Image (tube, grey):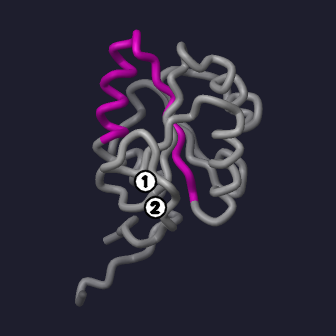
Amino acid sequence: MISLLGKFTSPRRICYPEIMVIQIRQDRDLEQLLEKSKTNPVLIFKHSTQCSISGQAYDEFREFAESAGELICGVVSVIEDRAVSSSIAERLNVRHETPQVIVIKDGRATWHASHWSITIDSLIAALRPYAQPVDPRN
């Protein structure tokens, strides 16, 4: 069994106090997440408020984030914050799609998915290399 709980350090929580999700609105927000990825993986979700598929993928992302302990997650609203959304694609060398989720470690994209490929199971699998095994005796 794999647990993401306890693996990640805790940054300041922004936007969603009950989970560790940071709203990415400017390039400096992206820079902070890229810096944090040097010690722990970071998850970015690119969301369109005008797309029903994005709404369903967001539900999967949010449910995952709620159970992911201290994993640092960022959300960018691609319509409202188009400039930073474009910066993410350029900086990480990942073609822009919406919805899209990107795992970042050491300042680079290590995995990404879009549309119907964004599921709780796919997010768990993408982050499994960074997780600590759970000791069943505890």
Q: Is residue 58 left or right of residue 131?
A: left
* Residue type for callout 2: Arg
Name the element at disc 1.
Answer: helix
For the C terminus, the quadrant is bottom left
Q: Disc 1 vs disc 2: Cβ atoms closer than 8 Å? A: yes
Name the mark on residue 37. Answer: none
* Residue type for callout 1: Ala
Name the element at disc 2.
Answer: helix
Image location of residue 132, percent across then percent down: 44, 74
Q: Which residue is mark 1?
A: 125
Q: Which residue is mark 2?
A: 128
At a point 67% along the width and 48% down the height, the residue shown is 32
At a point 52% along the width and 64% down the height, the residue shown is 129
What is the magenta range? 41-62
| Viewer-closest of 13 and 83 | 13
Cα–Cα gap, marks 1 and 2: 5 Å
User: Is residue 54 magenta-colored?
Assistant: yes
